[in-house]
Image (cartoon, helix red, strand yellow):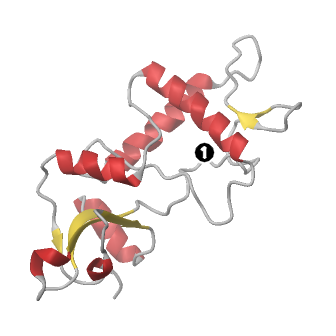
Amino acid sequence: MANLRVGFDSLYFARIDYQDRAKRKDEKKLEVIWQGSKSRGSSSQIFAGAFKSHYSPPTGFHFEVNDDSPIVQDADTNLYYPQDDTNLFDYNVEERVSDFVNAALSMANVTRSNHIMWTMGDDFQYEYAETWFRNMDKLIHYVNQDGRVNALYSTPSIYTDAKHALNEPWPLKTDDYFP
């Protein structure tokens, strides 16, 4: 795959051997320079990253699953969102922000910098895009107001640029990801 990267700056994926993923997390080597061909040398290199677990959101932030988190349902719209009205009994902004920050710090513990890619996808999802964006908009607002981490909508390209700007010496991988 690294050899077939025509026009790409990076490659991110979820599916690797579970033992390889565990070892890479321990050694902070989920992100590497992947050289797909020894004979082609650096011309076959690409920045590659395996996700911490999968490309689904961290536990508690799957906004189409009713019992996945203590996010409140709006009876009028049937949408789930952080309850930010302090006058209501189910106000939960601090709890949701703390959960978000803890999940982000956990992800940062297995990378080589404080930049993390928090993917919010999964197979057969986003039937209710408004639910996802309403939740993310509120979380980004309150997380950034909290100030412990900075959250933003981004793209793989922007993430890759941020990683390259670190001038970090990335580990070199020369073999395949599957045994």
Residue 175 at what x, y percent from top left? 23, 83
Residue 100 at what x, y percent from top left? 50, 37
Q: Is residue 30 above or below residue 93?
A: below
Q: Is residue 35 above or below residue 30?
A: below
Q: Horizontally, is 156 left or right of 2 in the view?
A: right
Residue 125 at what x, y percent from top left? 68, 59
User: Which of these two is toward me, 17 or 135?
Assistant: 135
How crowded pointer 1 is (Cα within 10 Å; few <14, some 14-19, many 20+) is rated as many
Which residue is labeled 1 in the image? Answer: 61
Q: Extreme front residue here?
A: 7
Q: Residue at x 12, y 49 (%)?
A: 167
Q: Is residue 30 visible?
A: no
Instruction: Determine the image quadrant of residue 76.
Output: top right
Residue 108 at what x, y percent from top left? 33, 46
Instruction: Determine the image quadrant of residue 173.
Output: bottom left
Secondary structure found at label 1: loop
Q: Is residue 47 visible?
A: yes
User: Which of these two is toward me, 34 or 104?
Assistant: 34
Q: Residue at x 40, y 78 (%)?
A: 17
Q: Horizontally, is 143 left or right of 159 in the view?
A: right
Q: Amino acid at mark 1?
A: Phe
Q: Is residue 74 above or below residue 118?
A: above
Q: Horizontally, is 34 left or right of 124 in the view?
A: left
Q: Residue at x 56, y 31 (%)?
A: 139
Q: Residue at x 40, y 61 (%)?
A: 51
